[in-house]
Image (tube, grey):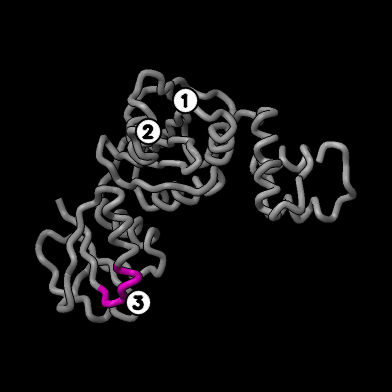
Amino acid sequence: MKVIGIFTEDFRFFYEVVQRLKERGEAFVSLGKEGKVPPSVGVVITTSAEKHKVHFSKVVDHPDPQTAIDLAKCMLAGGVHYHTIIVGIDPGKSTGIAVFGEGKLLSADTASSPERVPEAVVHLLSCLKYDRSLARIGHGDPTRRDRIIRVIWDAVDEVEMVDETGTSARSDRSDIDAAKRIAMTRGEKVKASPKVRPTPGELRDIQRLSRIESEGTVTISSDLATQVAIGDISMPQAVQFQRKKPRSSDE
């Protein structure tokens, strides 16, 4: 199997690419200062300033490390037509994402918020050839889970909810490992995009976090906390809105 080659003297870019590849268990080869490409390499990641030094047919020079990796993986998978692409999603605070094509791991990543999930998924799907796409999402953390289902609803052909009960303890798994496990587990088809319903406890916690965000000067209202919980606005936006509002009884 061909692997990714890395050619750059930009230490920061090299470090970020290597760290992401290691975190995801991706095989890669450092091409050193000479840039000689061995037969095991199928695509080379480099910088735009150094691209002219790489004498190879498949080269990626995108400045963002994760995007560069995704583009490189697309090139490695080029020409393959998949029957089904499965996207496994673990809806934790750091959302794990794993994309499989016919049982082969094509990409693994994390997203900082539910609304960033489509960005991580759609970019890869856009450069793959497939007949059907299926997203499988863990049933835990209902609010984040339903936010994710809502934002990816139009990006995939079908969504399944996977019951993770009985799997290994959460402390023993990374977010990405959990996403891989979810992707390989059959779930129950989700028939309609759900309405996000945050719990009173979640809203109180968001209000607590708003005090931290504002360094103790503001507690956002329950209405603004609801908007944060369902992903309509960010915490900094909510704090800014609250500063402009008169004080109310639920602050």
Residue found farthest to the front: 216
Q: CA distance from mark 1 to mark 3?
A: 42 Å
Disc 2 target residue: 171
**What residue do we see at 19% from left, 71% from top?**
56
Q: What SS does tag 2 mark?
A: helix
Q: Bounds of the magenta span?
A: 8-14
Of labels 2 and 1, earlier in sequence is 1
From the viewer's perspective, tell me whether residue 209 is left or right of residue 84.
Answer: right
From the viewer's perspective, tell me whether residue 67 is left or right of residue 197.
Answer: left
Residue type, label 1: Met
Residue type, label 3: Ser
x, y percentage for residue 79? 25, 51
Of labels 1 and 3, earlier in sequence is 3
Disc 3 target residue: 48
Disc 1 target residue: 161
Of labels 3 and 2, earlier in sequence is 3
**What residue do we see at 31% from left, 36% from top?**
83
Dot 3 crowding, Cα within 10 Å, few <14, some 14–19, many 20+:
some
Of residues 227 and 87, the one nearer the viewer is: 227
x, y percentage for residue 241? 79, 53
Residue type, label 2: Ser
Q: What SS does tag 3 mark?
A: loop
Discs 2/1, front: 2
Of residues 69 and 205, the one nearer the viewer is: 205
From the viewer's perspective, tell me whether residue 129 is left or right of residue 29.
Answer: right
Residue found farthest to the left: 39
Examine the rendering and report whether any part of residue 224 can be seen.
yes
The relative height of residue 14 versus residue 220 in the rendered view (above or below) is below
From the viewer's perspective, tell me whether residue 219 is left or right of residue 195.
Answer: right
